[in-house]
Image: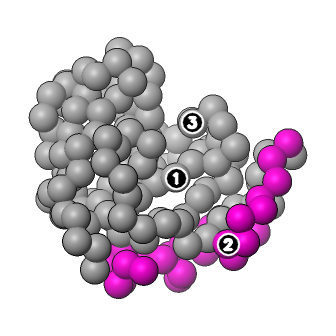
Amino acid sequence: MASQTCFLGRCLCGLVRFEIRGEIGPFAYCHCTSCRRSSGTAFAANGPVRKSDLHWLSGHGQIGEFESSPGKFRAFCRGCGSPIYARLVADPDWFSVRLGLLDDAVPHTATAHFNVSEKANWHSVTDGLPQYSDDTTDSLIDPESEIP
C-alpha cells in the first residue's frame, strides 16, 4: 500500500477545501463523453475515495450537484465551476474525486484508459497503458484492491 494517507485538495477559487484521510484507490483515465464535457478536456482522472475518508475543511455549502445520468451525480464548486467529485447512488460509500484538485502528489499512476471508443478525435493515447473501448472499471479496478 502507498505510504501517504493524507491528501489536501481545493477547487480553483479556493472556496471548497477538503482532506482525504485515507488511501486513494487505483484509478484510470476516462474518455467518455460525460467526463470530457464535465472536465472540458480530453479525459478525466478520478480517484476512488471512501466517503468516510473525505473531510470538508471549507466550502461544503458551495458544492452543487448535477445528476448527469440516472443515479450518477457530478459535483462542482458554485464559485468557480471546478469539478470536485462524482458519486453513484448505488455505491454510497465511495466518491470519485478529481485528482487534479489535489495539492499533494498521488502516490501511484493510472492503470488504464477507459471508454476510448468515445475519446476526443484530437487526442492520441500514447502512454502504453491498456486501453478499453468501454467502461470496464468495475471488473478491472476494484477500489479495495492493492494499489500498485
Q: Amino acid at mark 3?
A: Ser
Q: Quadrant of the N terminus?
A: bottom left
User: Which numbered disc, 1 or 2, marks the residue that appears first in the sequence?
Assistant: 1
The residue that appears at 43% across and 28% down in the rendered structure is 82
Q: Is residue 132 on the magenta stretch?
A: yes
Q: Are marks 3 and 2 in contact (CB under 8 Å)?
A: no
- In the image, what residue type sits under mark 1? Ala
- CA–CA distance between discs 3 and 1? 12 Å
Give residue 26's position: percent from left, percent from top: 42, 71
Closer to the camera, 91 or 1?
Answer: 1
Q: Residue at x 23, y 51 (%)?
A: 7
| Residue of label 2 | 129
| Figure colour scheme | one colour
Image position of 89 (left or right of 34):
left
> Would residue 88 be seen by someone viewing this image from the given angle?
no
Mark 3: few/some/many CA within 10 Å (<14, 14-19, 20+): some
Query: Which residue matches tag 1?
Result: 45
Q: Earlier in the sequence, mark 3 or mark 2?
A: 3
Identity, as a three-letter code, of the amino acid under mark 2: Leu
In the image, which residues are magenta? 122-148
Q: Nearer the viewer, mark 1 or mark 2?
A: 2
Would you say 73 lies left or right of 32 here?
left
What residue is drawn where x is 13% and y is 35%? 57
In screen coordinates, is 23 left or right of 11? left
Task: Name the residue beneath numbered marker 3.
Answer: 38
Where residue 76 sits, quadrant-wise, is top left
- Which dot, 3 or 1, sits closer to the camera? 1
- Local secondary structure at mark 2: loop
Q: Which quadrant would residue 131 be assigned to in this image?
A: bottom right
